[in-house]
Amino acid sequence: MSKRIFLGVAAAALVLGCGAAWAQQTTTTATAPKGRVVLTVTGNIARTNAGQSYQFDMAMIDALPRSTFTTRTPWYDRPVTFSGPRLADVMAAVGAKGLSIQATAINDYKITIPMSDALEHPVIMANRIDGKAIPVREKGPLFVIYPFDSSATLRSSVYYERSIWQLKAMHVE
């Protein structure tokens, strides 16, 4: 029995090792940003444009498919309209393969966002509030936001904490 377990573990390690080698061989380089970098994505990604990372300027973010929703939040006294690319589209753009995203804000606040959130909910990485660019002093330039009004489940501290503003980096694990 223990020999069978050992062989199973060894086979799994070989498959994972081959998978990692394949991922490294299929990494592609994308166009580098021309403007100021506002987001850097690292980790388990298949596409890069700056060494081992993928950097976005605002024009690159604006070029991704856009999504918009209006929702109430704990941070504003009225419903607010957020727009930007879906988090799932950002992850697809970099070829992300992982179970979680370690998101970091300008002030180094960090939160882990399960990759499943990006697939199960229309979470967006907003770069506009009520149609206007988001200044840093008002939680910008990037704000990961959930459509809280779409589900009672999303109106909880778990999802409020995952709504990171002044986003500067993501690491896919």
Image (spheres, rainbow, N blue to C red):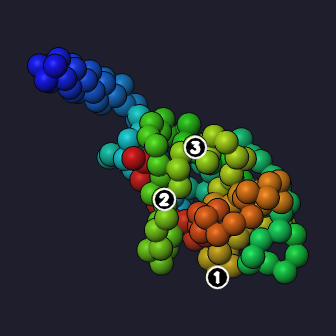
Query: Above or below — where is 29 with respect to 103?
Result: above
**Total label count?**
3
Mark 1 or 2, closer to the camera = 2
Q: Which mark is residue 112?
A: 2
Q: CA distance from mark 1 to mark 3?
A: 30 Å
Tag 1 residue:
137
- Mark 3 neighbour density, 10 Å: few (under 14) some (14–19) many (20 or more): few
- Whichever of labels 1 and 3 marks the residue nearer the N terminus, that label is 3
Of all residues, the one furthest to the left in this rendering is: 3
- Dividing the image into 4 quarters, which one contains the N terminus? top left
Amino acid at the residue labelled 1 = Arg
* Residue 83 drawn above or below residue 65: below
Q: Residues within 10 Å of mark 1 (few under 14, many from 20)?
A: few
Q: Describe the element under mark 1 as helix, strand or loop.
A: helix
Q: Residues within 10 Å of mark 2 (few under 14, many from 20)?
A: some
Q: Position of residue 70 (x, y in %)?
A: 85, 60
Q: Residue placed at 77% from the left, 71% from the top? A: 73
Disc 1/disc 2 C-alpha distance (Å): 23 Å
Q: Of 54 and 109, which appears nearest the observer?
A: 109
Question: Looking at the image, is 16 positioned above or below residue 168?
Answer: above
* Res 118 quadrant in image: top right
User: Which amino acid lies under the numbered mark 3 shown in the image of this protein?
Assistant: Ser
Residue 165 visible (yes or no): yes
**Numbered circle sitting on residue 116:** 3
Under mark 2, the amino acid is Thr
- Residue 43 as seen in the image, left or right of residue 152: left
- Tell me the distance, in whole angstroms, between the alpha carbons under discs 2 and 3: 12 Å
Residue 34 image point, x, y percent: 52, 53
